[in-house]
């Protein structure tokens, strides 16, 4: 018999899972997502979340509480009479009455190989740390931060040049299929839960703007991982000092190359830049107020010569 589900999610990452659950024939009693946010140039327009829009397309009830801490919200949640809650990047804390407000509990789709990278930014942190693989996991939620037992896991390799955006899209698709698989096992009564290991715990704290600037004193491998881990958003950046002017330059794609020089020094006419050890070549960049562009296109508008500096 199909499960009666409350879905809780907000960004684009959550949408494929919502659609897959509906397509699998489960009954979605309601969709919880974060409230519409101010957007537009003047911040006067309220924009619905990707999950909000997808839920409306599917004809589902949408709820957008600012918090779930009140007794009224918790009562409204329990009153749905759901078998299970599915949570994918919702962005709000679930208090105990909500975690215990369904017959079978709350199951979360988390984009890391738990217990590594618990927290808000597991995809970015895995790449920035140079991890060679990660995992998409379905876990039963507890009050702790991503501490619950794991139901299903699927390993995902991280290519040496893969960006956070590319890994995000891979994990998004894996998460949808894995959640449907977990719900089928839960429905059949044969979903097995395995406690997380006590060793190897790391935390994927939210990306802070202060850490997005490139440090050219670091080795080329670390600079490369930093750039791709922040691409396309929020984007690693540096200051370009050339022809007597300075401007901010966002770096979206690099590759490691042979070369040496003072950290931040432009080494050739194809945008190879020296790091603390080794060098990286800039492949895709973005000037302030402009669209992303390949390095060759950028160089047609900005003349750089060996010896110019990025800082």
Image: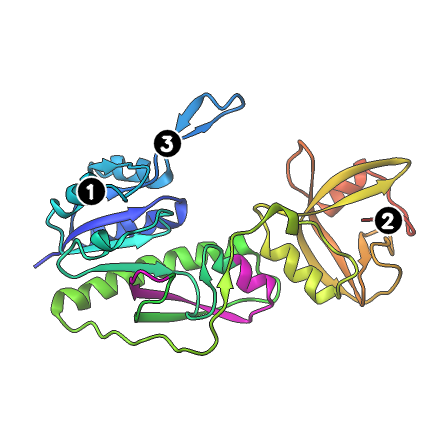
Q: In this view, does 182 lie to the left or right of 264?
A: left
- Dot placed on the residue nearer the N-terminal end, 3 or 2: 3
* Real-space CA distance between mark 3 and mark 1, rounded to the nearest whole angstrom: 23 Å
On the picture, is 280 further left or further right than 172?
A: right
Q: Which of marks 3 and 1 is nearer the N terminus?
A: 3
Q: How far apart are marks 2 and 1 (CA)?
A: 58 Å
Badge 2 marks a residue whose secondary structure is strand
Q: How far apart are marks 3 and 2 (CA)?
A: 43 Å
Residue 215 x %, y %: 74, 56
Residue with the mark numbered 3: 36
Label 2 vs label 1, nearer the camera: 1
Q: Is residue 11 magenta?
A: no
Res 183 → quadrant: bottom left
Q: What stretch of residues is rendered in magenta?
A: 124-144
**Which of 213 and 223 lies nearest the eye of the viewer?**
213
For residue 14, above or below residue 158: above
Residue drawn at x 24%, y 55% is: 96
The answer to which quarter of the image holds residue 177 is: bottom left
Q: Sequence order check: which comes first, mark 2 or mark 1? A: 1
User: Mark 3 near mark 2, Cβ–Cβ under 8 Å?
Assistant: no
Q: In this view, does 37 lie to the left or right of 21?
A: right
> Which residue bears the numbered disc 2?
309
Q: Residue at position x 45%, y 78% from top?
A: 199
Identify which residue, 115 or 263, lies in the foreground.
115
Q: In this view, does 277 lie above or below 168?
A: below
Query: 279 or 236, which is in the foreground?
Result: 236
């Amino acid at each position: 018999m199909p499960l009666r589900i409350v879905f809780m999610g907000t960004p684009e990452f959550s949408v494929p899972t919502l659609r897959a659950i509906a397509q699998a024939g489960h009954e979605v009693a309601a969709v919880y997502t974060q409230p519409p946010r101010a957007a537009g140039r003047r911040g006067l327009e309220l924009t619905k979340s990707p999950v909000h829009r997808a839920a409306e397309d599917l004809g589902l009830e949408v709820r957008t509480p600012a918090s779930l801490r009140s007794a009224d919200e918790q009562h409204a949640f329990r009153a749905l009479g759901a078998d299970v809650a599915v949570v994918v990047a919702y962005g709000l804390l679930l208090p105990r009455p909500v975690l215990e407000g369904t017959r079978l509990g709350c199951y979360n789709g988390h984009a890391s190989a738990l217990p590594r990278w618990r927290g808000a930014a597991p995809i970015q942190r895995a790449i920035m740390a140079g991890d060679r693989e990660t995992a998409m996991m379905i876990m039963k939620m507890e009050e702790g931060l991503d501490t619950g037992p794991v139901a299903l896991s699927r390993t995902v390799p991280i290519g040496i040049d893969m960006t956070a955006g590319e890994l995000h899209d891979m994990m998004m698709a894996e998460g949808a299929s894995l959640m449907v698989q977990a719900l089928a096992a839960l429905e059949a009564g044969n979903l097995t839960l395995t406690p997380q290991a006590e060793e190897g715990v790391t935390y994927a704290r939210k990306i802070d703007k202060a850490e997005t600037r490139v440090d050219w004193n670091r080795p080329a491998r670390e600079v490369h991982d930093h750039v791709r881990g922040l691409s396309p958003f929020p984007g690693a950046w540096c200051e370009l000092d050339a022809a007597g002017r300075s401007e901010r330059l966002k770096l979206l794609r690099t590759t490691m190359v042979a070369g040496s020089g003072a950290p931040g020094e432009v080494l050739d006419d194809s945008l190879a830049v020296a790091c603390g050890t080794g060098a990286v070549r800039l492949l895709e960049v973005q000037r302030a107020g402009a669209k992303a562009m390949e390095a060759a296109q950028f160089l047609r508008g900005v003349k750089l010569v060996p010896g110019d500096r990025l800082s």
